[in-house]
Image (cartoon, rainbow, N blue to C red):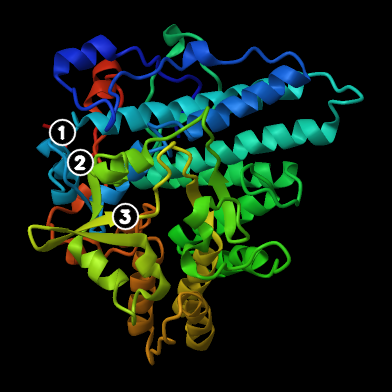
């Protein structure tokens, strides 16, 4: 297994210009930030805390969870369509994307920048001397947060591109890059689990919806074990959150977790916080011009029909708004609407824990238990109980519920891929397109970085 002790220096702006990877500034920015010079020198309590804040800053950047990452994943499914002027971005939906698609590179860069910042904390904070104010508990928490975010970042890499370059130490010079081959998918998942276990051991068992704690780790472990088809473990970790009734509850109606400038509700397990100083472009890209946006990301007609059907959408109809254009409805999403750019990025919600547990129970033939969890989510949105008499039908109900519950939260594509249903549901035939291409700009500067099958030309 190649565990790389270094990351690339992302200084490709002139190269990208030569490649012609230009687009609207508000949609994507193809000039990568330079990661290596951003690392904080960690010498004391204050610099350690600043370095950890830097990891979160990169995680919530527009090129990561602030917009571009959920954008490329949403467009790969069937809930969201791109309606802007640049047709190349529609290739994500048609599954004909090429390795020179600009957003792929900006996302890759942002994820590895996040990893590099986490590596800096993991490597340097243990060396910071303890004081009366910088206690072992505080030091452990900072290191644990870095492990958690690194696990999340590698999880995003592996489910988007497959095997990752496992960069486990901070890089301060591009000259240190040697033999940057990718690890396998199983090796990458093994590293993710190692990081989650390390984070779990270090973090406090408190409730914090915008910073990682032991409970945040449990939630991501539930998702991890679902992807790995480790059903009993998925149930165990989802139940840890579900059973914490004092701190986690489903809010009602459905839109209570996002409407009226809501944030950090009891349904939230982990979300990213924005304010007028740290903003994102979600609303700008989702909202129509009448609300200060450009509306380049819109719901598909298919998901709008499901959301506005009382039997399937219920309260979740609040996710969409219809505007009549030449007598025909044009749909806009309502999840991201704050024109000052302060919409949270919703990473993990309690309803996901219920649906993870429902799916895992269904695979273990606990149909009654699975239905109970599924209907808990449905009932919150005031739709009738679902019924199923066999495993296949129940799993399809859960798939459909996931589609509606997380309509614009970048779940749909990953759910279809991990269950082997993407080709059938989305109607494409090339199985290699279930992984996105490694950005061409990255391969140009690292010849040992292999391309995914189906994108070699």
Q: Quadrant of the C terminus?
A: top left
Q: Residues within 10 Å of mark 2 (few under 14, many from 20)?
A: few
Callouts 1 and 3 close, C-beta under 8 Å: no
Of helix, strand and loop, which one carries label 2? loop
Q: Mark number for residue 333?
A: 3
Residue at screen point 11% across, 63% down:
328
| Separation of marks 3 and 2 at Cα, in angstroms | 34 Å
The answer to whether residue 167 of the structure is visible from this angle is: no
Tell me if label 1 and label 2 are in contact, CB under 8 Å: yes
Vertical comparison of 279 with 374: above or below: above
Please rate how many residues cluster around mark 3, counting C-alpha atoms within 10 Å: few if below 14, some from 14 to 19, many from 20: many
Q: Position of residue 196 (x, y in %)?
A: 61, 46
Task: Name above or below for residue 170 compared with residue 28.
Answer: above
Q: Is residue 159 visible?
A: yes
Reply above or below: 241 against 369.
Answer: above
Q: Position of residue 247 (x, y in %)?
A: 70, 62
- Of the two numbered discs 1 and 3 in the rendering, the one whose residue sits closer to the viewer: 3
- Give the percent coordinates (x, y) of residue 259: 48, 57
Task: Please state if 47 lies on the left or on the right of 398 as rendered.
Answer: right
Determine whether the residue tagged by mark 1 lies in a helix, strand or loop: loop
At horizontal 73% and vertical 45% (from top left) the residue drawn is 201
* Label 2 sits on residue: 453
Q: Earlier in the sequence, mark 3 or mark 2?
A: 3
| Residue located 70% across and 66% down the image | 244
Task: Name the residue that disc number 1 marks.
Answer: 456
Determine the CA span between mark 1 and mark 3. Answer: 36 Å
Observer-nearest residue: 180 or 379?
379
Gap in Å between the C-alphas at discs 1 and 2?
Answer: 6 Å
**Front position in the image: 132 or 67:** 67
Question: Reading the chain from its start, which is encountered first: label 1 or label 3?
Answer: 3
Residue sticking out furthest to the right: 132
């Amino acid at each position: 297994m190649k565990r790389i002790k270094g990351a690339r220096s992302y200084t490709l702006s002139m190269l990208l210009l030569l490649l012609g990877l230009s687009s609207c500034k508000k949609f994507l920015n193809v000039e990568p930030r330079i990661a290596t010079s951003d690392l904080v020198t960690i010498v004391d309590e204050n610099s350690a805390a600043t370095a950890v804040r830097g990891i979160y800053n990169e995680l919530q950047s527009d090129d990561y969870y602030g917009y571009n990452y959920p954008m490329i994943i949403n467009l790969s499914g069937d809930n969201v369509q791109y309606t802007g002027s640049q047709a190349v971005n529609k290739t994500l939906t048609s599954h004909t994307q090429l390795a020179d698609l600009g957003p792929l590179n900006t996302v890759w860069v942002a994820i590895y920048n996040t990893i590099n910042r986490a590596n800096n904390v993991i490597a340097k904070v243990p060396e910071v001397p303890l004081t009366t104010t910088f206690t072992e508990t505080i030091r452990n928490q900072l290191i644990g947060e870095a492990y958690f975010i690194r696990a999340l970042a590698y999880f995003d890499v592996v489910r988007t591109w497959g095997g990752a370059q496992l960069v486990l130490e901070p890089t301060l010079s591009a000259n240190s890059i040697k033999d940057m081959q990718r690890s396998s998918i199983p090796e990458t998942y093994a590293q993710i689990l190692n990081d989650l276990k390390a984070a779990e051991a270090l973090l406090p068992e408190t409730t914090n919806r915008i910073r990682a704690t032991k409970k945040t780790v449990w939630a991501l472990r539930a998702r991890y074990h679902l992807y790995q088809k480790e059903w009993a473990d998925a149930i165990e970790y989802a139940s840890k959150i579900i059973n914490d009734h004092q701190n986690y509850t489903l809010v009602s109606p459905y839109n209570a977790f996002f409407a009226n400038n809501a944030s950090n509700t009891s349904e939230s397990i982990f979300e990213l916080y924005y304010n007028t100083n740290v903003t994102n472009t979600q609303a700008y890209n989702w909202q129509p011009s009448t609300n200060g946006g450009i509306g380049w990301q819109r719901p598909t007609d298919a998901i709008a029909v499901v959301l506005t059907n009382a039997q399937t959408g219920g309260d979740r109809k609040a996710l969409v708004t219809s505007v009549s254009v030449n007598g025909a409805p044009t749909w806009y999403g309502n999840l991201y609407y704050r024109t000052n750019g302060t919409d949270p990025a919703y990473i993990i919600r309690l309803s996901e824990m219920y649906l993870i547990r429902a799916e895992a129970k269904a695979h273990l033939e606990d149909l009654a238990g699975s239905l109970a969890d599924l209907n808990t989510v449905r009932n919150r949105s005031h739709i009738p109980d679902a019924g199923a008499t066999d495993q296949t039908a129940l799993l399809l109900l859960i798939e459909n519920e996931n589609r509606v519950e997380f309509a614009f939260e970048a779940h749909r594509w990953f759910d279809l891929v991990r269950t082997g249903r993407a080709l059938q549901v989305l109607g494409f035939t090339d199985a290699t397109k279930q992984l996105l291409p490694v950005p061409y700009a990255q391969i140009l500067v690292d010849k040992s970085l292999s391309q995914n099958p189906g994108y070699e030309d």
